[in-house]
Image: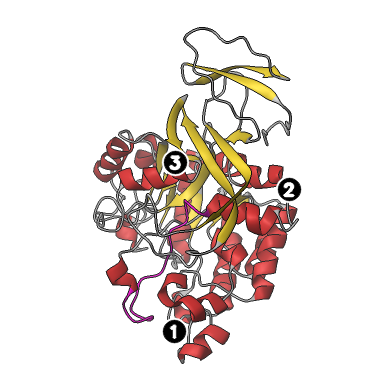
Amino acid sequence: MDPKSETDRKADLIISDGKVESIIAGGGAEVLPDDEVIDAGGLIVAPGLVDVHVHFRDPGFTEKEDILTGAAAAAKGGYTSVVMMGNTDPRCDNTETLEYMQQKASETPIHIYVTCNATLGMKGKEISDIARLHKAGAVGVTDDGLPITDHGILSQVFLKAAQCGIPVSLHEEDPALISENGINRGRASEYYGIGGSPAEAEISLIKRDLKIAEGTGVSVDIQHISTAGGVEAVREAKARGLNVHAEATPHHFTLTEDAVINHGTNAKMNPPLRTEADRQAVIKGLQDGTIDMIATDHAPHTSEEKSRPLTQAPSGIIGLETALGLGITELVEKDYISMMDLIRLMSYGPSQVYHLDAGYIAEGGPADIVLIDPDAEWIVRDEFASKAHNTPFIGWKLKGLTKMTIVSGNIAYRAE
């Protein structure tokens, strides 16, 4: 199944030297003595998944995750390409940190790319040397984790990123409107007796930033969209011709604010889980193309951090190892979208926004492939390749499982 060409057929793939050498429709490829044969009968052979929003916490916070364990979690989840965020320590606003991350990434079996900070120190006061960072290999810029509240600074970031031809990824939460982050203002905040984070914190900043983007030519990625109003703002901006894209996380199309009542800190994230109406709006955005990609916002934390009181614990959950199963179980099996749509949202769609040679299967293209058993049922257990365990999905029964992940023709993961 190839979402780029809309191909859905039985065929044999011949892989050589990290590329797809040929595709034999109907099967029957000649097998040479030294060939390794992988029997994918009963499985879906799809482009390796692409996640443009992961936190591998390296450098600076490797007790939570590091680039090697993050890559292992990605491969287990079917991902062949991921894009790391730059909210590290030191911040990724300089080529030295970027080069460290690139070097560590080169030691993993998957493709790992880096977004650098849009502003120095993620302080929102002065823009980074975006041209230099892009020349050194940054595939985008972002202050993810923090919004850029200064209108003038954001405008400068947009103009410079547009000149470089790279996207700007935006964390859209206005801190001036938030009492306590990570918990929706509504049923969840009332349950805990706090002010929480209102939907308007996201909606107002999305509208403001899309207005600033007009006329700059920048490609904007609205990260982890969580509100009906935010989805509608992106839909309207696309209709006006803006080069705007949006991510949905598995947790935002699967859960509501009730999860934070039931699971506490393991369902606390920024932006927070919202209402059922918001969840349905996110799904509608996935259906009609307003939302271009599914991204996990894989955010590992230690058990000690997540055991703190709700308002003191950090926000975020891990997601790389459950995303595919959640997409199949919650979107495909419930007839919201087709399997081809899901594969597009998790591979070709995100690869296009970040200009990656990924997300498709074609002769001469990269041999980055995932083998999926769409009918396999499994229970999410506390047995992750990630260092972290912070997720509300432990115990869930999911359908759809990664059986093998192939990167540049090499097997990066094989299910036991």
Check contact, mark 2 vs mark 3: CB within 8 A. no
Which three-letter amino acid code belongs to the residue tagged 2? Answer: Ser
> Residue 408's x, y, as percent?
46, 26
Q: Is residue 315 above or below residue 264?
A: above
Q: Read off the residue under disc 1.
A: 179
Q: Coloring scheme of the render? A: secondary structure
Which residue in the rendered view is the most extreme toward the top? 33
Q: CA distance from mark 2 to mark 3?
A: 23 Å
Q: CA distance from mark 1 to mark 2?
A: 39 Å
Q: Secondary structure at mark 1?
A: loop
Q: Is residue 392 left or right of residue 23?
A: left
Which three-letter amino acid code belongs to the residue tagged 3? Answer: Ala
Q: Secondary structure at mark 3?
A: helix
Q: CA distance from mark 3 to mark 1?
A: 38 Å
> Residue 305's x, y, as percent?
30, 71
- Residue 226 in view, yes or no: yes
Q: Where, quadrant-wise, is the N terminus in this rendering? A: top right
Q: Secondary structure at mark 2?
A: loop
Mark 1 vs mark 2: give the one in front: 2
Q: Read off the residue under disc 3.
A: 75
Q: Is residue 224 above or below residue 353?
A: below
Q: Where, quadrant-wise, is the C terminus in this rendering? A: top left
Residue 321 falls within the magenta-colored stretch: yes
Q: Read off the residue under disc 2.
A: 338
- Mark linked to residue 190: none
The residue under the point 63% across, 24% down is 362
As rendered, which of 221 and 325 lies closer to the eye? 325
Neighbours of disc 2 within 10 Å: few (<14), some (14-19), many (20+): some
Which residues, given as a range, are shown in magenta?
Answer: 307-322
If you read the primary sequence from the N terminus, does the residue marked by circle 2 or circle 3 appear first?
A: 3
If you read the primary sequence from the N terminus, does the residue marked by circle 3 or circle 1 appear first?
A: 3
As rendered, which of 14 and 141 lies closer to the eye? 14
